[in-house]
Image: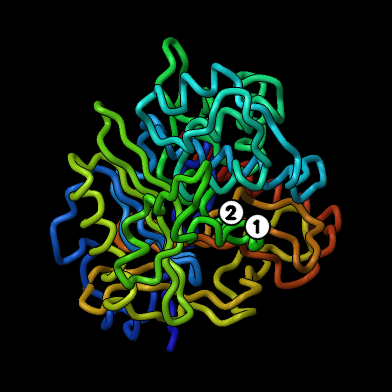
Amino acid sequence: MACFTGTYEKTKFAGKLRFAAVLIVSQFILSHAQSAEPPFAVKSEQVLLFDSDTGSVLFARKADTPFPPASLAKLMTAEVAFHALTTGKLQPEARFIVSEHAWRTGGAPSGTATMFAKIKSQLTVNDLIQGITVQSANDGAIVLAEGMSGSEQAFTVLMNQRAQELGLKSSVFANPTGLPLDGATQKVTLNDMVKLAQHLHKTYPQYYPLYAQESFTWNNIMQRNRNPLLRLNLGADGLAMGGTKDSGFSFVASAESGGRRIFIGLNGAKTIQDRTEDAEKLIRWAMNDFVKLPVFTAGTEVAQGSLYGGTQGSVGLVVHDAVSVLVPVQDKGKLRSQVIYQGPVSAPVSKGQEIGRIQVLRDKEILLERPVFAAQDVSEGTLRNKSMDALYELATGWIRRLLK
């Protein structure tokens, strides 16, 4: 199955020299693989298609390019609320009052997505969350924010704190709705939004099904879920849509079929119809036209890591779990893997110590990434070991310094 030929290449990463062990994936895998591009036009300018089971990026286009979140911001609003409910800081039956600001900015007078909540009426947290997840209700988001934190501004601090805690490094939120706010910076990336969607699905199984709720009635007004994918027999069960005049229409969605879960992020579609068609085609393509291929079995040694000052000069690097990747059935693109770590690693090293990351790539595109660990204990060496390593560093270290 897997025969590997290995070389070592020096790679600059985050301003520091790292060694990358480059391993070419076996011909068994290459013979099944063939083009990262889908066999149809994708009209959205930015795309991220991700398989949750293998952690494979199936297709990506400008997934790190920032854009205004619009209603995608409500995914972060919901996360803050779900987190507070889970930790007991918020109670589902707590009631919050609809302020005039919430009514004018996100209610009936706003002309935006709304629950049509009346001024001074009281809504439970349960109702507000349904309004946000099912109808993307702006008044619901503002009422929740004011009720939890006293103001939109104070709630936004919580949003950005949670975003950083979750590793959404490129996203900044300015309010709980995503509505335009003069002078404020608000931006997200598809990578961050898909990561957030995965987190919502994995962490809050008791609340995530709200995104698939077919309809919600409040104030005697019944409104259907705004997500058109729910009615297309795709296995779709979330999440949110957005759009601005300048950046186009966006979508963060998920679908499950046959035990596989797909997450998709889109932005830059010129019309709502283009956005829906892109999402539908990409989900069907992901579910029907990919094959799962094993790359490494659990415990496989994938490279040797260079050591300094140890009883031996290197240590095996292994993956703890099996690694598989999804590739299009008709894809002939070259797959390879590489291990990236900062080295040489100073001894002593403990078995199971995380040393670096292994990446599986198609051409230059990273399909997935996993940690690698030391395969054994390596003790600190004798003075002679350290002296020999120091002489080696003296002879070769100038090369790394030149590459810095």
- In front: 102, or 350? 102
Left or right placement of residue 205 versus residue 236 in this view: right
Looking at the picture, does residue 338 appear above or below residue 172? below
Look at 71% across and 53% down and name the residue there.
Answer: 308
Residue at which label 2 appears: 200
Say whether marks 2 and 1 touch (CB < 8 Å). Answer: yes
- In front: 401, or 147? 147
Name the secondary structure under disc 2. Answer: helix
Task: Point out the image quarter for the N terminus.
Answer: bottom left
Look at 20% across and 64% down and name the residue there.
Answer: 38
Q: Please, what is the three-letter code of the amino acid marked with disc 1?
A: Tyr
Q: Position of residue 240 (x, y in %)?
A: 42, 48
Tag of residue 372: none
Residue at which label 1 appears: 204
Q: Position of residue 391 (x, y in %)?
A: 67, 47
Q: Position of residue 360 (x, y in %)?
A: 43, 64
Look at 57% across and 78% down and name the residue there.
Answer: 322
